[in-house]
Image (cartoon, rainbow, N blue to C red):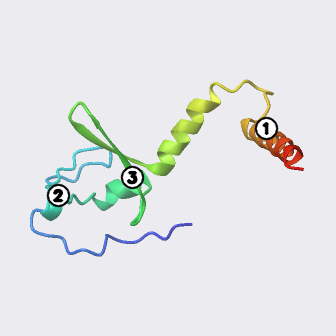
Amino acid sequence: MTKRVSGFGEQQQPGFGSRLDQASPSGGARLKIGPGGRVVIPADLREAMGVVEGDTLLTTLVDGELRLMPVATALAEARALVREFILPGSPSAVDELILDRRREQAEEDLKNR
């Protein structure tokens, strides 16, 4: 389990990462771009996203909106999407790949004898 830390070890700068209101994690945070283009994600939003210092986020720009998504969330969404196309009882794609690679290796070994 990842240890949760408070903040990112940086001093908050005047006007940097400040919030105008105490809105819920679903929105309402107003952030400022700081030195070097940095933006501080408020602690309540980081907690709601389930991210801690050192985690990697994926970014997308959609209609002028910057969207951040934890890698774990993106992987879970991708797995769910793929799962929709796998028929119940169908063989494991991983097992099939391993069998194919073993067959190829056996053929290669026979050629090299």
Estimate the x, y position of residue 75 in percent, counting from the top left.
Answer: 53, 44
Estimate the x, y position of residue 28 in percent, counting from the top left.
Answer: 22, 45
When the figure is inspected, residue 68 is found, relative to residue 80, above or below; the finding is below
Measure how far apart labels 1 and 3 are at the Cα level.
35 Å
Label 2: how many residues lie within 10 Å, few (<14), some (14-19) or many (20+)? few
Estimate the x, y position of residue 24 in percent, counting from the top left.
Answer: 29, 48
Which is nearer the eye, 74 or 107? 107
The residue drawn where x is 23% and y is 30% is 63
Kind of residue at disc 3: Leu
Measure how far apart labels 2 and 1 are at the Cα level.
48 Å
Which is nearer the eye, 44 or 79? 79
Give SS at disc 1: helix
Tag shown at residue 37: 2
When the figure is inspected, residue 84 is found, relative to residue 21, above or below; the finding is above
Between circles 2 and 1, the one closer to the viewer is: 1
| Image-quadrant location for residue 81 | top right
Contact? badges 2 and 1 (CB < 8 Å): no
The residue drawn where x is 60% and y is 31% is 82
Give SS at disc 3: strand
Kind of residue at disc 2: Gly
Between circles 1 and 3, the one closer to the viewer is: 1
Measure how far apart labels 3 and 2 are at the Cα level.
16 Å
- Answer with mark 1 or mark 3, whichever residue precedes in sequence: 3
Left or right of residue 16: residue 73:
right
- Answer with mark 3 or mark 2, whichever residue precedes in sequence: 2
When the figure is inspected, residue 11 is found, relative to residue 88, above or below; the finding is below
Tag shown at residue 57: 3
When the figure is inspected, residue 85 is found, relative to residue 60, above or below; the finding is above
Tag shown at residue 28: none
Kind of residue at disc 1: Asp
